[in-house]
Image: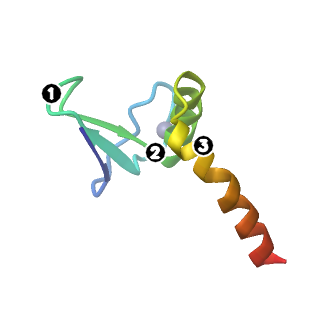
Amino acid sequence: MKVEKCQHRVKCDFMGCRNLADYYVSTRGFVKNEFAFCANCMKGLFEELSKLYVPKAIESHFKPNRKRRKDEKD
Ligand SMILES: [Zn+2]
């Protein structure tokens, strides 16, 4: 499965969303050939998925990164 930047003007596949798709998942026919979605829906989808599955490697990686970023701004 691959997520790629959408080059074509296709509509977001999420129900009720009228945005143009920014990305698509190439599933090779697993769901359908391509599942296109806009950046807004990707964010929503990711938030929902992260409630179900939190990758621990990323979570522990996040905290020092955030601190460093804040220090840079100040
Ligand atoms: Zn959308």
Farthest residue in the left direction?
28
Residue 29: mark: 1
Q: Nearer the viewer, mark 3 or mark 2?
A: 3
Q: Is 28 in front, or is 62?
A: 62
Find the residue positioned furthest to the right: 74
- Taking 26 as reference, is 50 above or below it? above
Report which quarter residue 24 is drawn in. Answer: top left
Q: Earlier in the sequence, mark 3 or mark 2?
A: 2
| Mark 3 vs mark 1, CA separation in Å | 32 Å
As drawn, the label of residue 38 is: 2
Q: Disc 2 to disc 1, how far (Cα)? A: 20 Å
Q: How many marks?
A: 3
- Look at the image and tell me in which quarter the C terminus lies: bottom right
Residue 21 in picture, x, y percent from top left: 40, 46
Q: Of residues 18 and 59, which is closer to you in this image?
A: 59
The amino acid type of the residue labelled 3 equals: Glu
Whether the residue carrying mark 2 lies under 8 Å from ligand 1 is answered with: yes
